Amino acid sequence: MSGKNPITARGADRLRRELERLKSVERPQVIEAIAEARGHGDLKENAEYHAAREQQGFIEGRISEIEDKLANADVIDVQALQGNAKIVFGATVDLFDLETEQEVTYQIVGDGEANIDEGLISVSSPIARALIGKQEGDIAEVAAPGGQREYEIVGIRYE
């Protein structure tokens, strides 16, 4: 394995936008807040100063984390995969839960961009691992925390 982590182009763009905001807006604001708090005198009992320094540490840590993710990212153009009949990284999959009879939709994304509330599941999650390589009409069996689940694959798209 190359050591690169897969990420969708949309996920990489989201990280780049966050990085730009952190560097151009939040970092200058916290530097200004630190300078202002310093002007208030004794730093030992200056809550604004300590809060601003803590915020600065968070911002710098996040900037470093995003730069590392982008440096180690293998950006996948999901739309270039259009027409792929089998489920691979980046696929948006419509599933029918055979137990609850509910339809759900997930996109298989990189570990760093997964967000279940947005329907983005990690490529290393049990459900994604059960889906990879399957085709429309197949049944995917997933070992979920609540027990075995079965999903019928009703649609696959790359968008």
Image (tube, grey):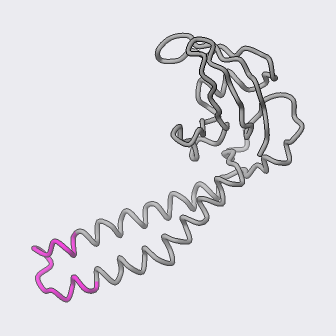
Q: Is residue 140 above or below residue 115?
A: above
Image coordinates for residue 83, horizontal then vertical, percent: 89, 37
Q: Is residue 57 left or right of residue 68?
A: left
On whether residue 42 falls in the magenta region, the answer is: yes
Residue under the point 63% across and 13% down = 98
Residue drawn at x 72%, y 54% is 9
* Magenta segment boundaries in residue numbering: 35-50
Let me know if residue 49 is in the magenta part: yes
Residue under the image location 47 percent in, 17 percent down:
145
Q: Position of residue 148 (x, y in %)?
A: 56, 10
Instruction: Determine the residue positioned at 74% across, 37% down.
Output: 91
Work out which quarter of the rendered image holds the N terminus and state it. Answer: top right
Q: Residue 127: where, in percent of width, then height? A: 62, 24
Percent position (x, y) of residue 33?
30, 80
Describe residue 88's horizontal placement relative to residue 148 as left or right: right
Q: Is residue 122 above or below residue 95?
A: below
Please, is residue 128 above or below residue 48 in the view?
above
